[in-house]
Amino acid sequence: MGGVRLDLPGGLQHLLELIGDLARDVSADPDGPSHKGRQGRLDYLEERGAIDAAIETLARAWTQYEVYRAAQTD
């Protein structure tokens, strides 16, 4: 894994690395989901036989994204 390593607690750093890995893999696929929302992206991973950890990572990342978005509108 390359890139910048932030000074974050271990669990958070690991989650960010997993999200980055997942994002790179999906963005490299010309048939990857675009603007399909949470379920569309989960379906995409499942249809391609993604490992459980990838699906769980997307679900966790999306939940954190929703929390962030909700905080921005408050």
Image (tube, rainbow, N blue to C red):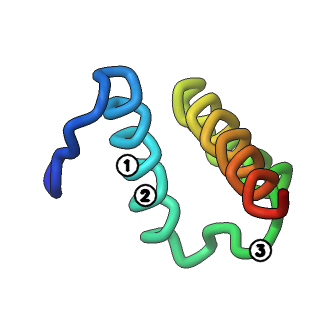
Q: What element carries label 1?
A: helix
Label 2–label 1 contact, CB within 8 A? yes
Q: Which class describes the residues within 10 Å of circle 3: few (<14), some (14-19), or many (20+)?
A: few
Query: What's under tag 3, amino acid-wise?
Result: His
Location of residue 42 with respect to 9 vertically, above or below = below
Looking at the rendered structure, the kind of residue marked 1 is Asp
Q: Where is residue 72 in the image (x, y as percent from the top left)?
A: 74, 61
Horizontal side of 50 relative to 45 (left or right) equals left
Mark 2 or 3, nearer chain start:
2
Q: How crowded is mark 1: few (under 14 residues within 10 Å), some or many (20 or more)?
A: some
Count neighbours of disc 2 (C-alpha within 10 A) and say few if under 14, some if 14 to 19, many if 20 or more: few
Tags 1 and 3 touching, CB below 8 Å: no
* Residue ID for mark 2: 25
Residue 20 lies, with reference to residue 49, above or below; the image says below
Numbered label attached to residue 35: 3
* Residue at 85% from the left image edge and 50% from the top image edge: 39
Query: What x and y, as percent, mark residue 2?
Result: 14, 53
The x, y position of residue 64, in whole percent, is: 66, 41
Cα separation, mark 2 vs mark 1, equals 6 Å
Judged by depth in the image, the label closer to the viewer, 2 or 1, is: 1
Asked if disc 2 and disc 3 are in contact, CB closer than 8 Å, the reply is: no
Q: Nearer the viewer, mark 2 or mark 3?
A: 3
The mark found on residue 21 in the picture is 1
Q: Is residue 49 left or right of residue 72?
A: left
